[in-house]
Every structure is written in C-alpha cells, then in structure tokens.
Image (tube, rainbow, N blue to C red):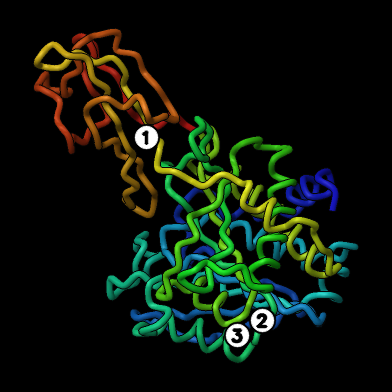
Amino acid sequence: MLLKTLKESFILHQEKSLSHRYICSDHINPLINKLSKKFTIGIIGESVNGEDIFSIQYGFGKNKILFWSQMHGNESTTTKALFDLLNTLQADNEISKSIESTCQITIIPILNPDGARSYTRVNANAVDLNRDAQDLSQPESITLRRLYDSFKPDYCFNLHGQRTIFGVGKTNKPATVSFLSPAVDENRTVTSNRLRAMELITVLNDNLQVQIPGQVGIYDDSFNANCVGDTFQSLGTPTILFEAGHYADDYARDKTREFIYQSLLLSLDFIGRQQTVDNGEEKYFAIPENEKSFFDIIIRNVKSVDDTVQDIGIQFQETLIDKTINFIPKIENLGNLSNFYAHREVNANSGVVLTHKGEPIYKGFENDFVLINNELFSLKLKKS
C-alpha cells in the first residue's frame, strides 16, 4: 500500500471527536453505537467496577486478527487510531472492500475501562493486566483470554503506548513508534509464528523510516510468561506489540496516532494479501532496541551548591485533573546527564538554579517554574 494512500486515508477518516490523551468509555461508546451494520457489536465482559467491555467484529475473510487496546488505561493513542481505522472500514471504498473480503477482525477498543476512566496503568484492583496472563485473576484478563480461545485468531495485535523516556538505541532520536515480536520461551526461539510477526514488523518499519527516520525501535525480547503477548506467541499465534511513543512536541499524541493508524492499515493489507518478506529475521534484529535515555527537559551546566557543574533532569507527571491530563514538571535526577537526551534542553551557562521560592533545588521538586540566575523560568509544557 502506497504511503500517499495511507496518508490520504488518515486525513479523510480521522475521528475528530477523539483527541489528546484522556480517552475512556464516555468518549468511545457513542462512536460504537453509530457504527453501521457492517459491524457486529458485543458486550463480552465487565470490568471490576462493572463497566462494559465491548468487542467489534468486521469482515468475512479467512485471515483472523484480534486487536485489543488500553490494556493499560493511560495508554490511549492506539484507541484513537483504532477508531480512525473503524471509520476507514465503515466507508465504501477499495480499501474497506479488500479488507472485508480477506480479513475477519475482532477489536476490543478498551480492555481496561476502569483504568481508562482513572487514567492509570492498572485496573481497579491495582493489577497490571499485562502481568496477569497466567493467573487470570482479573475479570478483564479472563475476558481477553476467553475471546482469544473462542475466536482462534491467526494474528494478535497488542496495542500500547510508551513513555517519553525511551530513545532508539544509542542515538538522540526518540522512540516514536516501537514494536516487538515477543519471545516464545526463555531461549527466545524464532519459531515460524514468531518469524511471521517479525516479517510484518519489518514492513511497518520500512514505511515509517521514510517519515520518521531513526525513530522506530524494538523492545527487548526477554521472555515473560506472565505477559499476554508472550503467552499468545507461545501458544502459536503470531503476536505483534505496537507501542505509540513520542514525536517532537506532540504530547497529545495526535501525530503519533497517524503512524499507528498507517501501521494498522498496512498490517491488514499485508495479511490480507498474504505477502511474504525475505530475510525477515535479519531485518527485524537490525532495528535498534529502545533504551531509557530521555528526559522531557534537561537544564544543562547548572552550578551546584558545592560549585561543581551538573545537569537537572525533569520528567512530566501525567495527572488527571477535571477530565484533562495535566503535565506537571518533576525533577527526577541531578548530576552528570551527559549520556541522556531531552525533548527540550536549556543551558544555564554555569548559573544557579533554585526553586520558585529561591530555595535550593532538590530531587522530587514539582512546580511549573524555577529560578535560573534569579530569573523566573517556565517549565510548563508548550502548547502542541
């Protein structure tokens, strides 16, 4: 599928009612109710707090793909991209007709409605659902596993979002989109189904490299049987982890959603056409691994109390206030941060940095302002 086609399709079908980072059932339920008769809507379970968990089915092709998003409630970018995709499938065009006839897809738009509502990674019982694949201790985990067992997918798409701390390898490039073909065992054996997932990822990487060169990474493939992706991969289903990360000043993740949308649409086209890739394993492992190498802000060359020069690393804390995500600056590290990068850098030029009250700076300090050489300096997130 041509890049021009992917970009034009996103512009045409983007779901305008979904934006920024806070997405919960209140936002998506009206959209589900408006879907056409092309789709089969089901309530397949309930969350801990009794919110409905929906499934959306589409297509009658032989290639069965299972999607789930917001397993972690505060990772909403992929949910936005899913509704962009649903708008595409709802339209009467060549893309939708091709996918409808070659694929059969089932989507869980929000697996963790309670976490989405409270904007937390975990569910209402404070359990990380992506560490519950074996115990199946939570109703949301049981719902997903029951659907997996009954649907018997040929592919699984595990849709997540990643923090701004990740960079690609040793470079100064942020990890805007990341993937993983999870391991099937402790030896990280490349089975036929794992290789198939790797091949698909290389196709997605090729498309993204044209647009965000050097900003695609893969995760470490250490095996963890408690993770859902590792479990489904070990059961013989090609499983792909999609991670929506940071791009430029796009803290709303409304640009990254386009890259995820393109990847989802390209995946369905690849699977539907039953395409193949030469040297897929080699190409996959040539993609650099992610590293925790970024701060949101670094203030460089700061004069410390003992007259040495150090750096200050600041990370935004994503906090839900009145149904809006606020980005609150917090000092996470003080010292030599020469091996780290930042999405925004400030040079103090060997000046003194104090709190907004003129007190010595310290790790854990949270405020929108600091004093640099006695001048008030804003750490607020710039409007994206």
Categorize mark 3 by other alpha carbons within 10 Å: few (<14), some (14-19), many (20+): few
Marks 1 and 2, the one that precedes in the sequence: 2
Q: Nearer the viewer, residue 327 or 18?
A: 327
Categorize mark 2 by other alpha carbons within 10 Å: few (<14), some (14-19), many (20+): many
Question: Residue 81's mark?
Answer: none
- Residue in the picture at 65% in, 48% down: 259
Distance between the Cα atoms at labels 2 and 3?
Answer: 17 Å
Horizontal relation, residue 128 to residue 286: left or right:
left
- Residue in the picture at 66% in, 65% down: 197
Horizontal relation, residue 177 to residue 21: left or right:
right
Q: Residue farthest to the right?
A: 94
- Residue in the picture at 55% in, 38% down: 247
Categorize mark 1 by other alpha carbons within 10 Å: few (<14), some (14-19), many (20+): many
Question: Residue 153's mark?
Answer: 2
Q: SS at mark 2?
A: loop
Q: Please, what is the three-letter code of the amino acid marked with disc 1?
A: Phe
Marks 2 and 3, the one that precedes in the sequence: 3
Q: SS at mark 1?
A: strand
Is residue 325 visible in this depiction of the protein? yes
Which residue does the numbered mark 3 point to in the structure image? 42
- Residue in the picture at 77% in, 66% down: 89
Q: Does the residue at mark 1 contact the one at mark 2 (Cβ under 8 Å)?
A: no
Residue 87: image location, x then y, percent: 72, 62
Residue 276: image location, x then y, percent: 82, 63
Residue 125: image location, x then y, percent: 28, 75
Q: Please, what is the three-letter code of the amino acid marked with disc 2?
A: Pro
Residue 91: image location, x then y, percent: 81, 64
Q: Please, what is the three-letter code of the amino acid marked with disc 3?
A: Gly
Where is 108 relative to 92, above or below? below
